[in-house]
Image (cartoon, grey):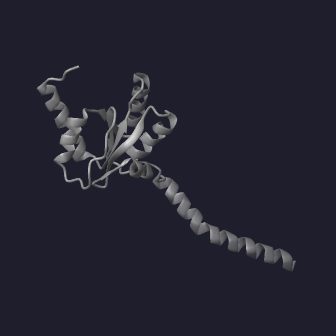
């Protein structure tokens, strides 16, 4: 379906706003994704304050070129969806979960993280970083482990002296 100039201008302005306001963005290829699953993804992402929009690659490139983002724009094959948000990791985490669930229907193809373009493998690595609560739990466990071992050793020494 052909899009007139006014509609393209509105889409472009929306993309510029997304690029300017977002802390991180993930570019996804959603080839073969049914509308029902796409609607489910949008609903879930919206509940977690993460946006999802679909735009033409040419308009997306133009919107990205005007911003101060380092690196080169990653290759964007197929249909392009943009997952974005005010949190640094949430967009990547959330869409990565859908990528695992929906086998080959949606794939991360790149993104923008900390003002730098990332390719597919780099964005998947970012998506696999554990959340803040998990990192806190791992840190507490790491600190607690030697203390727990020391207490168990003291307990065994006390038992042997009885």
Residue closest to the far right: 162
Give the x, y percent position of residue 117.
Answer: 30, 51
Q: Quadrant of the N terminus?
A: top left
Of 162 and 101, nearer the camera is 101
Residue at image position (16%, 26%) is 7
Give the x, y percent position of residue 115.
Answer: 27, 54
Residue 17, quarter of the rendered image:
top left
Q: Is residue 124 above or below residue 57?
A: below
Of 158 and 48, nearer the camera is 48
Residue closest to the far bottom: 161
Residue at image position (31%, 43%) is 75
Q: Quadrant of the C terminus?
A: bottom right
Give the x, y percent position of residue 142.
Answer: 58, 66
Residue closest to the far top: 1
Q: Is residue 36 above or below residue 11?
A: above
Of 31 and 88, nearer the camera is 31
Residue at image position (37%, 42%) is 109
Is 78 left, or right, of 7 in this rendering?
A: right
Q: How many numbered discs, if any?
A: 0
Residue at image position (34%, 33%) is 78
Give the x, y percent position of residue 19.
Answer: 23, 44
């Amino acid at each position: 379906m052909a899009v007139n100039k006014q509609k393209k201008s509105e889409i472009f302005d929306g993309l510029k706003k997304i690029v300017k306001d977002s802390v991180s963005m993930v570019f996804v290829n959603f080839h073969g994704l049914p509308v029902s699953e796409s609607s489910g993804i949008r609903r879930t992402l919206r509940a977690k304050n993460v946006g999802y929009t679909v735009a033409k690659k040419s308009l997306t490139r133009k919107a990205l070129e005007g911003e101060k983002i380092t690196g080169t724009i990653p290759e964007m094959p197929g249909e392009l969806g943009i997952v974005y948000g005010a949190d640094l990791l949430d967009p990547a985490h959330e869409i990565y979960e859908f990528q695992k669930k929906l086998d080959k229907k949606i794939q991360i193809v790149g993104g923008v993280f900390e003002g730098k373009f990332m390719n597919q493998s780099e964005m998947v690595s970012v998506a696999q970083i554990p959340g803040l609560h998990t990192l806190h739990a791992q840190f507490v466990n790491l600190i607690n482990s030697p203390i727990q071992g020391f207490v168990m050793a003291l307990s065994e020494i006390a038992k042997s002296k009885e």
